[in-house]
Amino acid sequence: MLLRHTIDSVDYRFDSLKDLLAKASPARSGGELAGLAARSAAERVAAQMALADLPLRAFLDEQLIPYETDEVTRLICDTHDAAAFAPVAALTVGEFRDLLLTDDVDGEFLCALSPGLTPEMAAAVSKLMRVQDLIAVARKVEVVTRFRTTVGLRGRLSTRLQPNHPTDDLTGIAASMVDGLLLGSGDAVIGINPAGDSAQRTGELLRLIDAVRERYAIPTQSCVLAHVTTQMAALQQGAPLDLMFQSIAGTEKANASFGVSLALLKEAHDATRSLNRAGPDANVMYFETGQGSALSANAHHGVDQQTCEARAYAVARVFKPMLVNTVVGFIGPEYLYDGKQILRAGLEDHFCGKLLGLPMGCDVCYTNHAEADQDDMDTLLTVLGVAGCNYIMGVPGADDVMLQYQSTSFHDALYVRSVLGLRPAPEFEAWLQGEMPSQLALPSPLLAALGSGGAGA
């Protein structure tokens, strides 16, 4: 396949599909670090023009990472739905972009199309889009999931209540939970990143959340974001586990660096479903991703970080998860240097995930050594709200004192709901409007409940 484009009599040639995709990517520090980025703005434009002329079918004919050596590639190929792909099979990437932006294409069409799209197709078309294009198309797609709450309905924005504590102190975690609940956070999940990774501690934290949930009849779900094997051990010890969590990536080698495989994820999924804690049709998996994970593990195989990120969504969608979110600025400025790059990446990830049929949220975040600040996060938060993001994080004061990064606060969620007319999940909203304020206004009964419910803790 000859991949080339001429600008001002200069002939730009690209060695392969992955070279073309990498050089067509908007500028970001990760591409520079990996030595994959375009060497000039002109070369980037040439790559984007050549990509626009490329048939979508090319991504079925040539795999970026060989089928024989990568189980994620095998998953992508083996689960591709040719019938769903048929409506766009004759299009180029550029024509596909134009189609997505027409008024004739709605969410119903895109949901039917998603099984026919590979992650590489989604990544490719995103590279041709402006920020407003990424927002406009993602907004069309409604991906709804259910456990005890229903997340992803149009006109709704949910939150993960993230009450992390640097020493896993149960009283400190409980205080953050009360803070978040009083400010309307927690309808997507109450999810704790543990400071330690033991089955015993995971079980203690899960029992803590469950004691509060049951005492106050809160319609939400619990999760402790330990390693999947740790959660499975806690599950076997009788811990009240609702959602099974795991960080995932877009290559077999990168997933191996996380200590997971597709077979292990299936085992965890099946074990969680067997608990039947919210009915047989409940979505039970929670995945997190982020651009740069494959590069940081030296497991990208020469594929650009944004395409690797989209490939992670192929791993997620086979398990029909309750929640997926890109922790967009968490990996650091080596991969997304500043607020501008973080904003673009967050919208790309949200767009690609929605296009592939996933219930996408975003941890609107940055590390303290990135060239970004909370104003950048306010901008990304607002445009994600416009784009129809399923959920965001709720962290006390937007400052995670355990993971040591900056995210969004309970108040930030109230802001974006207010200015965009968005509401929490319907079951959680009904609870907020019912007995919740009078019950949680006084901390003493809650602490007493925690003392008994978390007694095993």
Image (cartoon, rainbow, N blue to C red):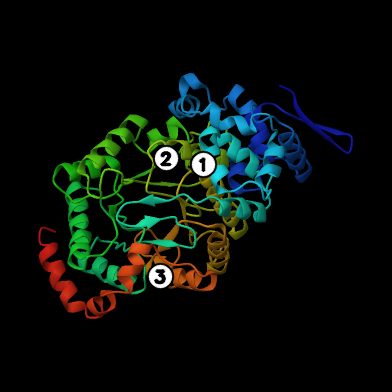
Q: Position of residue 113 (x, y in %)?
A: 55, 38
Q: Residue at x 27, y 33 (%)?
A: 267
**In the visual, does 402 lie left or right of 139?**
left
Q: Position of residue 398 (x, y in %)?
A: 43, 68
Residue under pointer 3:
410
The amino acid type, in three-letter code, at marker 3 is Phe
Q: Residue at x 37, y 48 (%)?
A: 322
Q: Position of residue 269 (x, y in %)?
A: 30, 38
Residue under pointer 2:
316
Residue under pointer 1:
309
Split into 4 quadrants, where in the image is the C terminus? Answer: bottom left
**In the visual, does 92 lie left or right of 230?**
right
Q: CA distance from mark 2 to mark 1?
A: 11 Å
Report helix, strand or loop for mark 2. Answer: helix
Q: Residue at x 69, y 40 (%)?
A: 24
The disc, 2 or 1, on the residue closer to the chain's N-terminal end is 1
The disc, 3 or 2, on the residue closer to the chain's N-terminal end is 2
Split into 4 quadrants, where in the image is the N terminus? Answer: top right
Structural crowding at the residue carrying mark 3, measured as other residues with C-alpha within 10 Å and reported as few (<14), some (14–19) or many (≥20): many
